[in-house]
Image: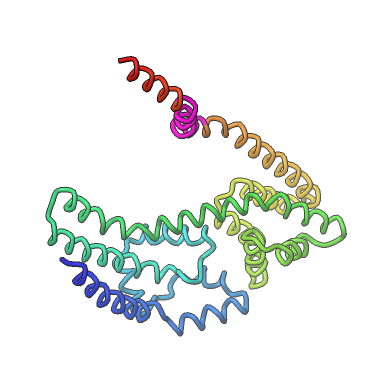
């Protein structure tokens, strides 16, 4: 196909894809319900009512996706902070749509030049397009968990200061959530919302640990749950946990610093040293070659 033919195909496919996406992605009723529930702090109630049936194209996406895989995607979205632009229903619709688009372009490439490499590419393109959202969400979730792990020592210090000043544990958590701007602050605010709608303290704290992959946060939540169960003062728990988190953060920084020479070794050997040899030895080699050519 010529360049003009590809341009015509693109001018036809792109607007149609945008129209289809806008049609299947907008759920005005669901958007209004989400806004209302967020305003009243009812998000945890939605999590405890799994019987709510999806509507429209979302129902088709749920039927086309295995239940175990859909649950795994929901966990990925929870770790990524449940982005507003990509809820689970929209993700379940987008994945088959991307696979169909990949299959369409694969068919076009195979029809144009059916060589071995192109056929292999046409076979791999639809599965790759299907799993692209998973890769993006997993990467976003990993970055978010790293941010939570970095913010945790400072947040515990703020909560410890508030508790020692006379505030309760939930009040200290609310102060840290209001003053913070990162993902950990958002998770603390959501935990407080769970408590406000009637969820028990243990369930709310365990839900906070389940939404995160950060080992330090899980350890802190387990300590708080045990202290709450046995009646231990949370001020001493916060003091001990804050000290441990600072030590772990320093240890992680030292570990990264010790790994740095090993990581720099191969780029140094294959990228920097050859260039230095060329710059240093190049003029001498040229002079030796000129002298040898002049001698003969």
Looking at the picture, how far across and down is residue 82, in whole percent?
51, 65
Looking at the picture, how far across and down is residue 111, in whole percent?
12, 61
Q: Residue at x 34, y 57 (%)?
A: 131
Vertical arrangement, residue 292 with respect to residue 29, above or below: above
Is 285 or 25 nearer to us in this picture?
285
**Can you say which quadrant of the picture contains the N terminus?**
bottom left
**Can you say which quadrant of the picture contains the C terminus?**
top left
User: Does the stretch in magenta take in 276?
Assistant: yes
Vertical arrangement, residue 241 with respect to residue 110, above or below: above
Answer with the quarter of the image where residue 56 lies.
Answer: bottom left
Figure label count? 0
User: Does the stretch in magenta take in 151?
Assistant: no
Looking at the picture, how far across and down is residue 262, in whole percent?
53, 30
Answer with the quarter of the image where residue 50 lies.
Answer: bottom left
Q: Which residues are magenta?
A: 265-281
Q: Is residue 54 left or right of residue 238?
A: left
Q: Residue at x 39, y 76 (%)?
A: 54
Q: Residue at x 33, y 65 (%)?
A: 95
Looking at the picture, how far across and down is residue 282, in whole percent?
44, 27
Judged by its main secondary structure, the magenta piece is helix
Answer with the quarter of the image where residue 201 lies.
Answer: bottom right
């Amino acid at each position: 196909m010529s360049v003009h033919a590809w341009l015509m195909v693109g001018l036809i496919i792109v607007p149609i894809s945008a129209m289809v996406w806008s049609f299947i992605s907008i759920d005005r009723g669901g958007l209004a319900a989400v806004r209302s529930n967020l305003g009243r702090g009812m998000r945890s109630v939605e999590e405890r009512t799994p019987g709510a049936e999806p509507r429209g194209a979302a129902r088709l996406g749920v039927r086309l996706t295995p239940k175990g895989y859909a649950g795994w995607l929901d966990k990925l979205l929870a770790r990524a902070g449940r982005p507003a632009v990509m809820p689970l229903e929209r993700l379940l619709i987008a994945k088959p749509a991307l696979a169909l688009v990949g299959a369409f372009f694969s068919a076009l490439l195979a029809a144009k030049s059916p060589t071995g490499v192109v056929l292999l590419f046409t076979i791999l393109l639809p599965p790759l397009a299907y799993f692209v959202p998973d890769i993006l969400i997993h990467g976003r979730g990993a970055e978010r968990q790293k941010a939570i792990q970095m913010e945790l020592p400072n947040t515990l210090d703020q909560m410890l200061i508030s508790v020692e000043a006379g505030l309760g544990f939930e009040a200290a958590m609310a102060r840290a959530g209001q003053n913070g701007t990162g993902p950990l602050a958002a998770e603390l605010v959501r935990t407080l919302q769970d408590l406000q709608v009637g969820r028990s303290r243990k369930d709310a704290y365990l839900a906070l640990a389940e939404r995160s992959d950060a080992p330090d946060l899980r350890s802190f939540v387990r300590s708080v749950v045990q202290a709450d169960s046995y009646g231990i003062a949370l001020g001493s728990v916060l003091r001990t946990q804050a000290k441990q988190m600072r030590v772990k953060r320093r240890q992680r920084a030292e570990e990264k610093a010790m790994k740095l020479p090993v990581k720099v070794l191969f780029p140094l050997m294959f990228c920097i040293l050859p260039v230095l040899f060329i710059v240093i030895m190049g003029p001498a080699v040229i002079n030796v070659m000129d002298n040898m050519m002049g001698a003969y």
